[in-house]
Amino acid sequence: MLHTTIFVLVNGLMYGLLLFLLSSGLTLIFSMMGVLNFAQVSFYMLGAYLGFQLMVWTNYWVALFLAPLLVGLLGAAVERYLLNKVHMRGQVAELLLTFGLSYLILEAVKLAWGVNAVNYGIPRSLDFPIFSIAGVSYPAYNVFMMAVAVAIFILLYLLLKKTRLGIIIQAALGDRDMVGMLGHNIAQIFTLVFGIGCALAGVAGVVGGNILVTEPGMALSLLPITFVVVVIGGMGSFTGALAASLLIGFLQNYMMTLNVSLAGLAGLSMGAHAPFYELLNQPLSQLAAIMPYLLMILILVFRPQGLMGKVKT
Amino acid sequence: MADRAYTRGLSLPQGLGPGAFFVVSLAAAPWVFNSNAALTVLSLMAVAVVFALSYNILFGQTGLLSFGHAVYYGLGAYFTVHALNYFAVSRIPYPVELTPLLGGVAGLFFGFVLGVISVRRAGLGFAMISFGIGILMGSLALILRHWFGGDGGLAGNPAGGTHLFGLTLTSPLEIYYLMAAWCVVCVALIYFFTNTPLGQMATAVRDNSERVEFMGYSPYQIRVRMHTLAGFFAGVAGGMAAITNGIVAPDALGFVLSGEVIIMAYIGGTTIFFGPVIGAVILSFMQIQLSNYTNAWQLYLGLLFVFIVIYAPDGIAGLLKMHAPAMRYRKLHHLLPAYLLVAVPGGVFLLGLVFLVQMGYALHGAQIFLTQSFTFMGLAFDDHSVWTWVIGAAVTAGAFLGARPGVARARCAWERITVEIKAAQALASRADGDTG
Amino acid sequence: MSPPALRLENVNKRFGLAHIIRGVNLDVCHGERHAIIGPNGAGKSTLFDLISGRFSLSGGHVFLHGKDISGHSAYRIRRSGLARSFQVINIFPRLTVYETLRCALLWSLGYRYNFWRRIQRLPEVGRRATELMEIIGLGAQRDVSGAELSYADQRALEIGITIAGEPNVILLDEPTAGMSRAEAEQAVQLIRRVTAGKTLLIVEHDMEVVFGLADRISVLVYGEVIATGGPDEIRNNVSVRRAYLGSTAEQETSAHAASH
């Protein structure tokens, strides 16, 4: 029992922080620019592939530095040459553009690396068990990943709340003409923010691509969960995103240990032809994958602004 | 303005033109494409037309960008297949030809229930929520293996059970005409709804939902109703697909399809009623025909989509509509030289792009399948030589730059005829004033 | 005695720490034309937002014909017969003038969420919309979309939307903002015509318009009503002169300078 609890806590923390890593760039771009970047996970995928490629050519640490830089530059170019052309047409046009972009990145990745998973491994220097619970040992690399996630949270928090740039950016959101008159070029700031947001996705790709799997389907498989994190956390809130990531991490890992069904919990026994028989008699571990979406719906019904979102007046 | 056509209550003669063209081409298509395979393709196009128009009830008309519209299509398809299987063995004489209606009812029900939850927000909030609901239902379909038939899906035989008008639904031609009939009925109904009080208020909600509240309407109530209607027609489309294919799998609810319907509607043009029809035909064609020739068709689709989003937000229908005044005032010939100047280098550029992409795929395929050599338009090229790449890239880039003078000239020509048309209009209205 | 058309009782609004509206009491009688004046930032538009249900009240009550409408949603308040216009143009960019007015009429004509009748077949809707179009002087712009109208025409449409469907209490928020003198005079005539016999509450900066139009005037300064009375009373009120009227010219110029 104690083992299970620790198991859930550790796995939940790990998965939750990985989710935060994934959604941090999305949250940054959304909160600063009001752009919902559908291609965020595509940049994550690109980060993972570039990380893999650079690790083959050089080593992991070079990859960890260079891959996010390249992804960030690509992101900045996308903002500069494509996204800002539709900026005036509003959020839906921007979302559609990034949606189209996700197709292009996916096809480009298939073109460059093929349709099968690549063998992106953990760097040897961090590939040793650091502790073990109930016979399952955890590689040091996972702890490294968690440290990166925490570091990014702290950095972003400081960047936005404590630095001049952060204050300017937040002012830019409030009143663009005003800041423009103060001499800070808003267009450049937006390019920079989008670039940083994509670079964050690149970091998540390099760090998370070898914990999960690096294949062309990885973007689409992670996209929904990052959206759910952002909706549950409250759109654009960092602390909200962190809280939602951890909540989902813990809940999902907890559910996976449960072998009982909803009907079993309620003490129902029903015939195979009763309505919802199949749903109610699924073991909860099977339903863990859809739990985040159910949670999202519950949040929407009872707290539409999300955990930490601002209420609109 | 092209975008107004959607909202303006088109008087019947105006609406009748494209409508008559649409019906005639649906009826005549089997004479041109008469192989069984082609007839199935045509049936699926009819399905896509209904699906794309149902999507545009949400996006073009109500301003709701949904990323999970396939849910209602897929559920409609499943209910139809279950109905087919049920009526095949039961004594209830429900005709197979009308089963898409049951799919529609399923779509209507889920469109209402899920709409109540999801349209509490519009804009990006709705986009994300519809996406989440789409993924939720798609995953549920895989978990509930009994009802959804697991990965392989469920089969249903439209030939069994009771039939109307002596149909048997055993030949692709019969199925095609059934689909065409459903398509015409649905298109007519969807068009009808755009001109009702609810349909008009939906366009008002799209434009400015806040002001609608100060007209006495609840935007939420309008959105729920439009979401329900869109669910109904998506369900009918799903039911039509189930009859055409005779099988439905969980990917009918999946995100890939939800994404495709966005692309269909948007490429065709969401601000014009018949726009999504054009998009549905183009995408079905690419999907079914182009995918035989190249693996890269989705890349081309993505490029087309991004191009449309940036440069032609009213889609292909919008581009066509843009030329209507020039046509009416006989100014089209002023544009042709400039268009030719763009078309020649532009065509070379597109060919070059396709060449490079196909060569990339070939190079990649060579590692896996050990294919012999890369052929493009009947010519063999050495895809391993750097020079092939350099020359290809140079020609492509050169063509891109070469198209620029033409674009500038086209822009000039546009400005010129716009002024001329405005002047002609002013003249005409003054003449009106004199006589009246 | 019947209750006043509109009554505000100790209406309050806070945004976080900022206390924007501080206990406003106001009675507007049937058929009265009542103007609210006050310096920039006094909370005039906020007061309209509170009455019309755009914002929720932080305290107090609003009564419409004696019925408490505090906390009602905007569309419910509109259905009870109170309509408003906006200071910043708030129309439908892609709908034509005719379509816009038709939409504005639908609820009051009882068509609600009807989806089984063609809108062109509803003779009353078409007739009333055409009438309204002539009244606001946009008959020639029938098929022009909201975004393409000139500024003055957008303002006229703004009023058209507001008066569609015969509301009995009308709130107009700076209907002549940004207009030339001639345009403003036309607008005043229009307002006179369309609000005859109705209750009107108007926020206006143009003093000529205010004193020419209003039966009674209330002065709002820093979220409080400091005086209410007839035009002459207000003109001669010492505290009003000190707080507002006397300093108007000065403020206008300084505001002008600040915006450059």
Image (cartoon, rainbow, N blue to C red):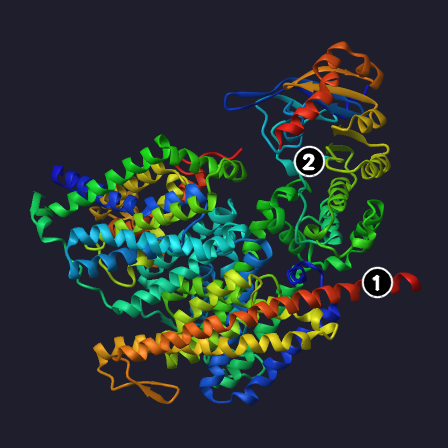
Across and down, in percent, residue A144 comes to: 16, 44
Secondary structure of the residue carrying numbered label 1 = helix
Horizontal side of residue A58 vs B53, given as left or right: left
Q: Amino acid at mark 1?
A: Ser
Residue under label 2, please give it.
C87
- Please, which chain is the residue tagged with disc 1 on? B
Horizontal side of residue C58 vs B204, given as left or right: left
Secondary structure of the residue carrying numbered label 2 = loop
Residue sticking out furthest to the top = C238
Q: What is the CA distance from the residue labelled 1 to the residue labelled 2?
A: 33 Å
Q: Amino acid at mark 2?
A: Gln
Look at the numbered discs 1 and 2 and tell me whether their residues touch, using CB distance below 8 Å: no
Q: Which mark is residue B429?
A: 1
Q: Is residue C120 above or below residue C178?
A: below
Q: Which is closer to the viewer, label 1 or label 2?
A: 1
> Would residue B288 be seen by someone viewing this image from the given angle?
yes
Foreground pick, B46 / C243: C243
Question: Are marks 1 and 2 in one subunit?
Answer: no
Q: Quadrant of residue C228?
A: top right
Horizontal side of residue C17 vs C211, given as left or right: left
- Please, which chain is the residue tagged with disc 2 on? C
- Quadrant housing the N terminus of chain B: bottom right
Foreground pick, C107 / B212: B212
Mark 1 is surrounded, within 10 Å at the Cα level, by few (under 14), some (14 to 19) or many (20 or more) other residues, namely: few
